[in-house]
Amino acid sequence: MSNRRSFMKKLGLTAGALSLSSILEPLLAAGLDDALERVDGMTPAEAAADEDFWAYIRECFTVSQNVINLNNGGVSPQPKSVQDAHIRYYQMCNEGPSYFMWRTLDQGREPLRKKLADLAGCSSEEIAINRNSTEGLNTVIFGLNLKAGDEVVLTKQDYPNMINAWKQREKRDGIKLVWLNFEFPIENDEVIVKKFAEAFTDKTKIVHITHIINWTGQILPAKKIAQEAHKRNIEVIADGAHSFAHIDYKIPDLDCDYYATSLHKWLCAPFGSGLLYIKKDKIKNVWALLSNTEPDSSDIRKFESLGTRSFASEMAIAYSVDFHQMIGSKRKEARLRYLKDYWAAKAAKIKGVKLNTSLKAPFSCAIGNFSIEGWKPEEIDGHLFDKYKIHTVGINWENIHGVRVTPHVYTALPDLDKLLEAITEMAQSLPKK
């Protein structure tokens, strides 16, 4: 995986009718293959600090030179190899839509399912390919057989689309939502696990766990919470929108029953791509969100009855998996944490700045959140872009008020230096009214 020859061979297994040599040439240019060989002998931590290697990775992207994008937590750009695959597949579809879409590209779904399952560490019979975390988690939330009085434990820091889905079930079916509220960052797993466990009763049927809180980057001890839930025969839903292809783990490691993620975030797959995981023995118990000829079957494919979809974007997912595997999960996680620590540790020492994210490895990775005394989050966000052309996102959600910063593997250290320059300037002044 760490040299040109093996990488070419690996990518050559990808299904599709593309000219790999023309697509991969930009990816492998400028000595990337040599760089891969060099870091292959390093530990992930050592590779994380090798700026020459990550400069080569940056060249694989087509990101703007005029805007510093530090909101990759919303959606990430794709490497050029993924973009090229997507464009070629799209062009192919337009050459003969019904033929190439259904008889050619659609035939690539099973190889893609296997590729995603290998990355996720589960059976391909447990993976459905869809459009995003919201679609996957809504499928489970609305597909579970819950009745009035059944309890679901969740937190006020969960993602709004999931919260709204649960509130709709509460309103429609009379289930009871049991809310937890956390003051992040928390640097003790047992504090979090204990709070979840204390909320469980004999009426609790589901616990909803956000693996990485999108607002602050807090990593929750999902497996420990799941183990406490399973002791009480409570089923576990995991929201992996911000953890998949971000931190190094396999879905079964979380001990969850249901899971969904967006592939257009940390995997850098085409926009509007995702996956849903359901344990094999649980599939038959979940109703498909969109109708299927066999709604009570045990076939994971019943959740893919979407009708006409973007076959081009689906098939291009495979190239994002290959790009991720080229870097390596452990190496990628180490780099993402290195980038967060690079700016966040320095920002935390600036007078008037508060860091709302832990700097300890078990509790955060790429995502960081900070606030500045005297500034509202939206004011910081606006000033960063207007004066410095740094794109972040202001957060005002429940008890979380700050600016989220999310670099990615293509982010350069000078970009983070510019962020620190901007934070220092703002901390020494007040916003203009």
Image (cartoon, rainbow, N blue to C red):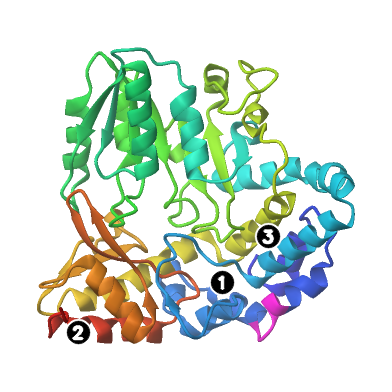
- Looking at the image, tell me whether mark 3 or mark 1 is earlier in sequence order: 1
Say what secondary structure mark 3 lies in.
helix
- Looking at the image, tell me whether mark 3 or mark 2 is earlier in sequence order: 3
Question: Nearer the observer, disc 3 or disc 2?
Answer: 2
The kind of residue tagged 1 is Asp
Q: Is residue 131 left or right of residue 252?
A: right
The kind of residue tagged 2 is Thr
Say what secondary structure mark 1 lies in.
helix
Query: Does residue 257 show up?
Result: no
Magenta residues (range) = 26-31
Disc 2 packing (10 Å; few <14; some 14–19; many ≥20): some
Q: Which residue is mark 2?
A: 424
Question: Nearer the observer, disc 1 or disc 2?
Answer: 2
Whether label 3 touches label 2, CB < 8 Å = no
Query: Does residue 63 show up?
Result: yes
Using the image, tell me which numbered label, if any, was put on residue 40: 1
Mark pair 3, 1: CA separation: 21 Å
Residue shown at 24%/61% (left/top)? 360
Q: Is residue 355 left or right of residue 121?
A: left
Residue shown at 42%/60% (left/top)? 73
Indicate the quadrant where residue 223 lies. Answer: top left
- The quarter of the rendered structure image containing the C terminus is bottom left
